Image: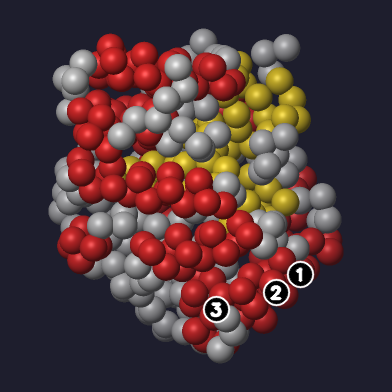
Amino acid sequence: MKIEEIREKVESGGRISESEALYLFNYPDILALGEIARGVKEKKFGKKVFFNRNLHLNLTNVCISNCRFCSYQKKLGEEGSYALSLQEALDLVSQAEKEGITEVHIVNGLHPKLPFDYYLEVVAAIKEKHPHLIIKAFTAVEVDHFSRFSNLSHRKVLEKIWEAGVRFLPGGGAEIFSPRVRTLLGINKIPGDKWIEIHQLAHQMGFKTNATLLYGHFEKAEEIIEHLKFLRAAQDKTGGFVSFIPLKFQPGRTELKKNLSTCVEDLRIFALSRIFLDNFSHIKAYWVTTGLKVAQMALHFGADDVDGTIKKEVIMHAAGSPEKEGLTVEEVVTLIAEAGLEPVERNTFYQPLKNYAA
């Protein structure tokens, strides 16, 4: 097997195998790998790189999962635990709306007491007061939590979320599908096959969703490729995934003492994701976890999106992310432009709103 053969296969629109993906993952010349990935990205989008204006709204950090890799979670009644009131949530959205956001991204801990109706009420109230905002809300893990605590099927939960105004589910909660690694990470929530099942059900009902991978801890190359294989197969069936987001593990304040992955390791993940996930339109360099500099480099290794302004990210910062909790539009535009690329503001569904290079 030679990298030139794989390059020709990819450039002609062919799909690489798992063994070819492993060969690429272990290929020593990271620049050659990046060149292939950049070619795929530029064939789709040219020099364009997307971002949006968004608010991350976390309604509660109380969680029953107690996953070892998470520093955001708190137990009920623990110092620092919280659950926003409806008015507190609306106030945060109203403030961010004045700054031009187009998306509210809602992800929460698995609270043992808050009823499902509370979350529906928050979403419905946001849509009523700000009908133009797109709400991206509730991971597959939360959908399962709502199902178990309300005795409703996953389908019924999704129906109620749809009625409240949600059209897009975030990709969190996938972590990594390998049972071996999930045990080491102390993941106490739905397994990978259930996560995929919920996303495919959501796709069939008209939702769009994202997908993620948490890397940089105990995983092996084969387990990363296995994770990507399951996502690619799921996308073949339902086609509802919009973007894939590699999430760099932040060990800082967790109980897992690991070194941060290196820049080269990060870029290898982005490049491989772009090449292997041939049925995913977008690969997102989530600057909160990668850091701004690596996110900038990832734009030349297959990524075409840097997420957005975010305004108030708390989950990764609880684990020790050194980056800002949010960026201004000017900072995002500069980040992209300094990489020699075209900043394009989008909405949640990747409809372009403004090309800053024009």
Name the residue carrying label 3. Answer: 146
Disc 1, SS? helix
Do residues under tags 1 and 2 come within 8 Å of each other at their CB atoms? Answer: yes
Whole-Å distance between the Cαs marked 3 and 2? 11 Å
Marks 3 and 1 sit apart, C-alpha to C-alpha, by 15 Å
Front residue of this view, candidates 37 and 7:
7
Residue at point 76% right, 69% down?
163
Residue drawn at 43 percent across, 36 percent down? 277
Inspect the image, locate mark 3, and give the three-letter code of the amino acid beneath it. Answer: Phe
Q: Residues within 10 Å of mark 1 (few under 14, many from 20)?
A: few
- The residue wearing badge 2 is 160
Q: Where in the figure is residue 249, as x and y percent of width and height?
A: 30, 47
Q: Amino acid at mark 2?
A: Lys
> Could one spot residue 130 in this view of the protein?
yes
Q: Earlier in the sequence, mark 3 or mark 2?
A: 3
* Mark 2 crowdedness (10 Å alpha carbons): few <14, some 14-19, many ≥20: some
Looking at the image, is mark 3 or mark 1 earlier in the sequence? 3
The residue at which mark 1 appears reads as: 163
Query: Does residue 32 appear left or right of residue 180 in this picture?
Result: right
Q: Quadrant of residue 131?
A: bottom right
Closer to us: 30 or 20 = 20
**Residue 152 in the image: above or below residue 95:** below
* Disc 3 and disc 2 in contact, CB within 8 angstroms: no
Q: Is residue 283 left or right of residue 54?
A: left
- Position of residue 152 in the picture relative to residue 78 (left or right): right
**Quarter in which the C terminus is drawn:** top right
State the CA–CA distance, disc 1 to disc 2: 5 Å
